[in-house]
Image (cartoon, rainbow, N blue to C red):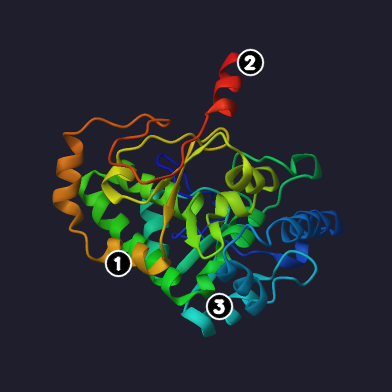
Amino acid sequence: MAEDNLTRPDHAAADWTIPQAWNRYTSEEHATWDTLFDRQVRLLPGRVTHEFMEGLDVLRMSRSGIPNFEELSERLMRRTGWQVVAVPGLVPDDVFFDHLANRRFVAGNFIRRPEQLDYLQEPDVFHDVFGHVPLLAHPVFADYMQAYGQGGQRAAALGAIDKLARLYWYTVEFGLIRSGEGLKLYGAGIVSSFTESAFATDDPSPNRLGFDLRRLMRTKYRIDDFQQNYFVIDSFEQLLDQTLNTDFGPLYAELAEEPDIEIEAILPSDVVFTRGTQAYAREKVVA
């Protein structure tokens, strides 16, 4: 939800928040949410981490229609002290980090059109709320998100947002987690996508590699299609510990002297869960 060089709309507050205007959603917009929600909750069991499904339950997100942010925030605040605030779309990096650092998750208040069910370039309310919010009910992941926001503020001062953005991309948006039943989804970009939910768990194309902070922050990623790499954490505790107990200042300085790693590369030092064929990506290039 962050991007540089954006102009704040006139109707947005100084922190870019706007009213959700829940009463203005049309019946078609609520129906679009229900369609997206219903097909994901049929697809995700067995693929997604159980903490995500627990979050859907405790936040009562199975109710019909687009969630009301005030009601959702009341339940979330009681669980982990987080709230959901509406924004008109993408927000600048400094605004995004400030909200996270203060346990506020920014969510677009618009929803895709019915013909955009499978892909929308800019995150909408379904991606932001269905994809991200359930895990904010999990105390450890909620702490990680706040720590990431605080880290983003430091990274901005050090000119290293591009490196930290890779951490967000490969964990919050497209992360996998180990469980006793195999690899499970937790990244919002996957769990909110009908097609990538199946691709990330079932397809032989992508690499699935063990989480390594330095390696991950050197690795390029793609924003226009399915991922070629997924990084696998052992637990949310591991993710929080790495974020809280790493001295990022010296790490950024070291990374600035090291070359980026190409998306599809597998290094000798990698823990490899799946050595992908990369067939999907190669077919797209040929096409």
Disc 1 residue type (three-letter): Asp
Q: Is residue 124 above or below residue 137?
A: above
Q: Is residue 171 above or below residue 141?
A: above
Residue 126 appears in which quarter of the rendering?
Answer: bottom right
Label ID, residue 76: 3
Q: Mark 3 or mark 1: which is in front?
A: 1
- Residue 155 percent coordinates (x, y): 26, 51
Query: How dense is the environment of label 2, judged by Cα within 10 Å: few (below 14), some, or many (20 and up)?
Result: few
According to the picture, the residue beneath numbered tag 1 turns out to be: 241
Residue at 44 percent across and 60 percent down: it is 15
Disc 2 residue type (three-letter): Ala
Residue at 35 percent across and 37 percent down: it is 219
Q: CA distance from mark 3 to mark 1?
A: 23 Å
In front of the other: 186 or 20? 186
- Residue 76 percent coordinates (x, y): 55, 78
Query: How dense is the environment of label 3, judged by Cα within 10 Å: few (below 14), some, or many (20 and up)?
Result: many
Point out the tag, 1 or 2, that comes first from the N-terminus.
1
| Mark 3 element type | helix
Point out the tag, 2 or 3, that comes first from the N-terminus.
3
| Mark 1 element type | helix
Residue 218 appears in which quarter of the rendering?
Answer: top left
According to the picture, the residue beneath numbered tag 2 turns out to be: 287
Point out the tag, 3 or 1, that comes first from the N-terminus.
3
Determine contact: label 1, label 2, CB under 8 Å. Answer: no
Label ID, residue 39: none
Residue at 80 percent across and 39 percent down: it is 115
Disc 3 residue type (three-letter): Leu
